[in-house]
């Protein structure tokens, strides 16, 4: 079983325990459109920050926008470059990296420095970024 399948299985278990109805799928988001779009909300934890170039992140942001309805919201939890780290952890991005990549497609409503939810004593720092899809003229 691959990482994606394990993540989906854990998500199904958590949704079931919370008595929440969700549909989970494994898809290459950068090359395929998700059925059922447009959606009102998108959540990302661990995808956006894994893309190394501004162009890749812009492409990702544009694809999120394509999948959202007018005024749709995107919440992204992103590795934060404001911490020096000796060990492993999520890729780190600056606030400028985020703004440069999402600005053409999203209005940033909130960009807050926080930490990843974790049972580690010192969880990695994260950006919690809430964005609204821009209305195109």
Image (tube, rainbow, N blue to C red):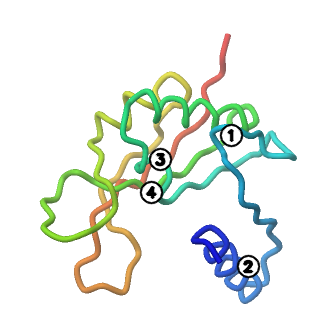
Q: Quadrant of the C terminus?
A: top right
Q: Residues under labels 2 and 1: Cα distance?
A: 24 Å
Q: Which percent across, then down, holds residue 48?
A: 47, 47
Q: Nearer the viewer, residue 80 or 86?
A: 86
Q: Residues under labels 4 and 1: Cα distance?
A: 17 Å
Q: Which residue is mark 3?
A: 48
Q: Which residue is mark 1?
A: 72
Q: Quadrant of the N terminus?
A: bottom right
Q: Quadrant of residue 99?
A: top left
Which residue is found at the position 37% from the left and 69% from the top? 116
Q: Is residue 37 above or below residue 122?
A: above
Instruction: Please indicate whether residue 50 sits to the left or right of residue 63 in the image.
Output: left
Residue that lies at the very extreme toward the top in this rendered image: 137
Q: Which percent across, then down, holds residue 135?
A: 65, 22
Q: Which residue is mark 2?
A: 12
Which tag, 4 or 1, sits closer to the chain's start? 1
Whether residues under marks 4 and 1 lie with C-beta atoms below 8 angstroms apart, the answer is: no
SS assignment at label 1: strand
């Amino acid at each position: 079983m691959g990482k994606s399948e394990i993540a989906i299985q854990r998500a199904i278990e958590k949704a079931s325990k919370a008595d929440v109805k969700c549909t989970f799928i494994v898809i290459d988001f950068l090359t395929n459109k998700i059925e059922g779009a447009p959606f009102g909300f998108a959540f990302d934890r661990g995808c956006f920050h894994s893309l190394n170039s501004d162009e890749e992140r812009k492409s990702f942001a544009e694809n999120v926008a394509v999948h959202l309805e007018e005024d749709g919201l995107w919440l992204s939890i992103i590795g934060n470059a404001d911490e020096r780290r000796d060990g492993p952890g999520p890729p780190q991005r600056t606030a400028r990296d985020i703004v440069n990549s999402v600005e053409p497609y999203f209005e940033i409503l909130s960009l807050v420095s926080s930490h990843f939810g974790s049972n580690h004593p010192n969880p990695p720092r994260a950006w919690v970024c809430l964005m609204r899809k821009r209305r195109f003229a």
